[in-house]
Amino acid sequence: MIQAHNIHKYYDDLHVLKGVDLHIKKSEIVSIVGASGAGKTTLLQILGTLDHFSEGELKIHNTAIATLNRKELAKFRNASLGFIFQFHQLLPEFTALENICIPAFIKKTQKPEAEKRAKQLLKFLGLSHRESHKPNELSGGEQQRVAVARALINNPEIILADEPSGNLDTESAENLHNLFFKLRDEFGQTFVIVTHNEELAEMADRKLVMQDGVIVS
Ligand SMILES: Nc1ncnc2c1ncn2[C@@H]1O[C@H](COP(=O)(O)OP(=O)(O)OP(=O)(O)O)[C@@H](O)[C@H]1O
């Protein structure tokens, strides 16, 4: 599903990733942990095609990412990858339902079809009664579940999450973590999760430890 070979990343003189090798299989849940500054977010951004790598090879679904031009990359990203961030980045002016539909509209899915799928996701996430609420009318845990639904609307095979529960209380974090496993079991999604949450890191099928720009275990 994801194959990264000898990935290096420089920010000017700063050598942030120093030869990362990574193979992630379909439906695997992989956590990435490590000290602050180890390069976890940089790696996730590269796997998510949101940032370029300086050297190495990256294949996702057998597509060599470096061969795609900007437009192809944007299309690939919107169709194949879903993102969940620590700060959900929902648009404040839009309702939960509208926020969830945005990636589907970008993909040019018709409104009735997008809304139907968004409503199914809201139901699956136990949020049907919240569909017309705006982000500031939702709790932190609810906002994050809306962000999860938004990440899932195009049915991407891979979900990339950066500190998804970093901003949540213990109970909401636990619910969110259980949700990832439920989604994987139900829909077969692959998850790559950068986290400082030990419990989540341990629950994953595989825990990768990063240190100073490489995966050490
Ligand atoms: N856009 C950028 N320009 C320059 N340096 C950057 C940029 N993004 C990250 N860095 C640097 O790259 C290094 C790795 O950062 P990164 O965010 O990947 O670490 P991290 O392991 O995710 O840390 P944390 O756990 O604190 O989020 C850090 O030294 C950081 O300052």
Image: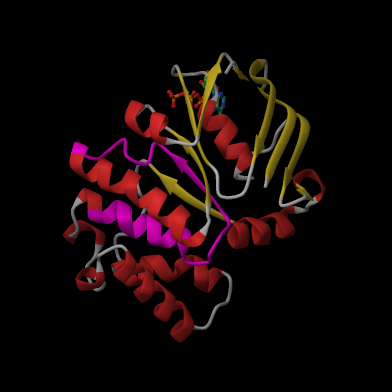
Q: Position of residue 95 (x, y in %)?
A: 29, 69
Look at the image and say whether residue 3 sits in the magenta stretch: no
- Is residue 123 placed above or below 5 in the rendered structure? below
Q: Residue at x 27, y 41 (%)?
A: 173
Spot the residue most to the right.
67
Task: Determine whether 73 is above or below 216 in the image.
Answer: below
Q: Quadrant of residue 201?
A: top left
Q: Nearer the viewer, residue 211 or 28?
A: 28
Q: Is residue 94 above or below residue 176?
A: below
Residue 94 appearing in the image: no
Quarter in which the C terminus is drawn:
top right
For the point 55% across and 23% down, the residue is 39
| Residue 117 shown left or right of residue 91 in the figure | right
Picture quadrant where residue 81 is located = bottom right
| Tally of marks | 0
Q: Is residue 20 above or below residue 168?
A: above
Q: Residue furthest bottom?
A: 112
Q: Is residue 160 magenta?
A: yes
Residue at 75% x, 46% y: name it: 65
Residue 9 % position (x, y): 68, 26
Viewer-closest of 100 and 70: 100
Q: Position of residue 32 (x, y in %)?
A: 50, 29
Question: Looking at the image, can residue 44 be seen?
Answer: yes
Would residue 160 appear left or right of 201 to someone viewing this image? right
Describe residue 184's horizontal placement relative to residue 8 as left or right. Answer: left
Residue found at x 67% / y 47%: 1
Query: Is 208 placed left or right of 117 in the picture?
Result: right
Towards the viewer: 148 or 132: 148
Give the magenta part as a residue range.
142-170
